[in-house]
Structures are given as C-alpha cells and as structure tokens.
Amino acid sequence: MTTIQYREIICNGYHEVEIVDENNSFDLKNFAQACGQSPDWVLQLLEYEILPARPEERIHQFFGDDIARARRAYRLQRDFEASLAAVAMMMDLIDEVQQLRKQVRHIQHQSN
C-alpha cells in the first residue's frame, strides 16, 4: 500500500490539496492505485498531456504533485462527463487562472 502525505488548504472558498512529500516517486501501478484509477487511464493522461511530459527513460515515474493533478482531472471528467481532450483544455485554463492569481497576489503584496 502506498502512503501519501498531503494537506488540504481552504482559503476564501478556494480549495487546494498540496502534497507534502513530493520527492517520493511512484511506478505506474502504484500511481494508478493511489489515484484510484487504472494504469490505462493514467497512460491516457500522459497521451493528452494532462500530466507533465517525461523523458522516455522515466515515462512511468510519477510524483506526489502528479496525484493531485490526476485526481483533479478525474473529477473534471466525472463531473462534466468530459472527454480527456476537454479535460486537458480545462486543466490548462485552471493552471492559467492559478498563475494569474499568484501574479495578482504578488503585485498586491508589493504595493503594501
């Protein structure tokens, strides 16, 4: 059984899960098990670039941050009955919004 240490952050209605032990790596089977999905589903996440690209020699090596991303992808797929192509686009938009929010917070912090 794989143990993953994480913490949940809820701030102003925004919910985020942060992996604490991000240096721990998983093989495909253990990663799929930690995500509650099949290895084939995980491979599709790589195919649609929902999970970050990896060098060929480490194609089946996953990290803690990948689990949170895969679980988010699953929730989007399930909740919106979306294809993985649609999920990939949604994930890109979510990433962009998060990056913009960080920039706004940084600018606000600098002006204080």
Image (spheres, rainbow, N blue to C red):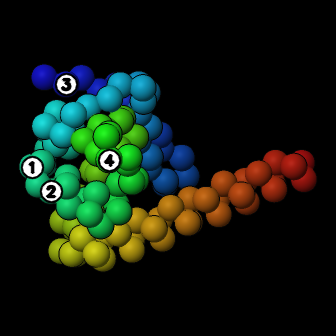
In the figure, 85 relative to 96: above or below? Answer: below
Any part of residue 103 in sight: yes
In the picture provided, is 108 more to the left or to the right than 15?
right
- Point out the tag, 4 or 1, that comes first from the N-terminus: 1
Q: Any mark on residue 66, and which?
A: none
Q: Which residue is mark 1?
A: 38
Q: Residues within 10 Å of mark 1 (few under 14, many from 20)?
A: some
Question: Residue 95 or 108: which is nearer the viewer?
Answer: 95
- Point out the tag, 2 or 3, that comes first from the N-terminus: 3
The residue under label 4 is which amino acid type?
Glu
Q: Position of residue 13 (x, y in %)?
A: 49, 54
Q: Secondary structure at mark 2?
A: helix
Q: Secondary structure at mark 3?
A: loop
Q: What is the distance, in whole Å, between disc 3 and disc 4 at their CAs?
A: 24 Å
Q: What is the distance, in whole Å, between disc 4 and disc 1 at their CAs?
A: 21 Å
Question: Residue 25 or 74: which is nearer the viewer?
Answer: 25
Q: Which residue is mark 3?
A: 2
Q: Which residue is mark 2?
A: 41
In the figure, 56 relative to 41: above or below? Answer: above
Given contact means CB atoms under 8 Å apart, are the residues at marks 1 and 2 in contact? yes
- Which image quadrant is residue 67 in? top left
Question: Residue 60 or 71: which is nearer the viewer?
Answer: 60
In the figure, 93 relative to 55: above or below? Answer: below
- Which quarter of the figure is the N terminus placed in? top left
Given contact means CB atoms under 8 Å apart, are the residues at marks 3 and 1 in contact? no
Given contact means CB atoms under 8 Å apart, are the residues at marks 3 and 4 in contact? no
